[in-house]
Image (cartoon, helix red, strand yellow):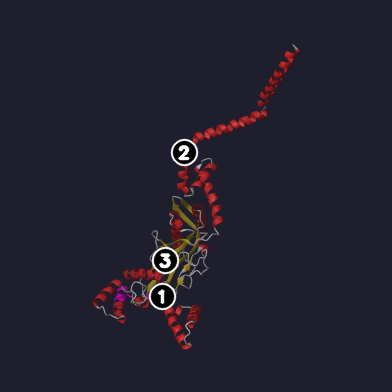
Amino acid sequence: MACSQLARRPLSILRNCLSNSTSARRSPLYLDYADSQYDFGVFRRRFSAEVPASEHTNLIKQLREMTSSPIMDVKAALIDCNWDVEAAQTELRKRGKVLASKKSARTAAEGLLALAQNETKAAVIELNCETDFVARNDIFQYLASSLANLALSVENPPASAAGFSSVGPEYLEDLKVNLDHPKLSGETTVQNAVTEVAAIMGENVRFRRGFVMSTPNGIVSTYLHACPGPGLGRFAGVLSLWAEDQISSSEALQRVGSELAMHVVAAKPLFLTRELVSSEAMESEREILRSQAESTGKSQLAIEKMVEGRLRKYVEEVVLMEQKFVVNDSINVKLLIGGPPSLHVMSECHKIHPHTILDDLLTVLDILSKEVGSSVKIGSFLRIEVGEGIQREGTSSASEPVAQAA
């Protein structure tokens, strides 16, 4: 009998333990934990019912189209924001701006020039990025065009002695620009717009410089080369022409102006006339030429003659009015501007008189000058190239040349 009672005692102990364990599970502390787990489970089930897994792909695609952000960043933002598209878009913009700030020190030597103009005024800006892949993106191109239009709308920009005005980031970055693009819209400052595009592109984007040229009594002619779209390019030539009798427009002026703007891009002039070549530039070139000539071992007299001859050649290469016209290298720009010629008329004249010398062409120029109604002159010119003067990796630094003339 005692043995049976002893045998049953462990069973009672075990029963009591199980009873205590059950009451422990029903304790307030456990109930709170259980309720919290239950609530979380309900939330998870309720949320999954609102945004089923089958919709996740569509949401990723939708946000990707809205922001053009990398797909992994889009997915991470949606997960962090519980698949709320609007919240994820805001989160992506915040992350992108931080990333853009971190990348602002990286070299941005690619990009585009954007041009906007009317009959008497033209504006050109340079927007840089790190790769030509981004330069082909429509968001980047839209921003570049918007900045050019903004520069064109600026009233009374600061003038320079060179005949054009500089409207760089220090002048435009605080101005408001109105954007109307599916992925970039609303009114914001230029600086914020550039930062937002940098965030979208994932690269350093930089508004580098801008120029405005105008003429009250003539026309402004432009030419863009390597154009991915209207008003965009990698090389730009801008040139102002005016007539002495203040004629504001002429078919001949427009025709020759476009040809001369193309000439500026191709021939890369640095000065308008011989008189505008700085003494520092002449002396620097003279020293270089003298050093080259002395290596030949010729006499001092021969060296001086060589230097002077090469110096004249240098002037012909860098002075616009002395250069051979790229459309017709039988004449130089000075002769061309003596009265803006029609290349078609010149070619027809040459067919009739194949042995005509340059002096005889003055008759053709006089006729064309009558067509314009007055003697025509170049006011100023400007040549810009994407990335010129920017030190790239593995290259030495260079100045930022802007071909110009007063």
Q: Residue furthest top?
A: 1
Residue situated in front as seen by the camera: 294 or 52? 294
What amino acid is labelled 1 in the image? Leu
Residue 391 in the magenta stretch? The answer is no
Q: Does the CB distance between marks 2 and 1 fall below 8 Å?
A: no
Q: Position of residue 141 (x, y in %)?
A: 44, 57
| Marks 2 and 1, how far apart at CA | 64 Å
Answer few, some or many: residues within 10 Å of disc 1's Cα (few below 14, many 20 plus, some between 14 and 19). many
Question: Can you identify the residue that label 3 sits on?
Answer: 236
Indicate the position of residue 35 as horizontal and vertical percent values.
Answer: 61, 30
**Residue type at the position of mark 3:** Ala
Name the secondary structure under disc 3: strand
User: Residue 55 — which label?
Assistant: 2
Q: Where does residue 341 sit, x and y in percent of width and height?
A: 32, 74
> Magenta segment range?
367-378
| Residue 334 figure quarter | bottom left
For label 3, the crowd category at 10 Å Cα-Cα, with few meaning under 14, some 14 to 19 and many 20 or more, is many
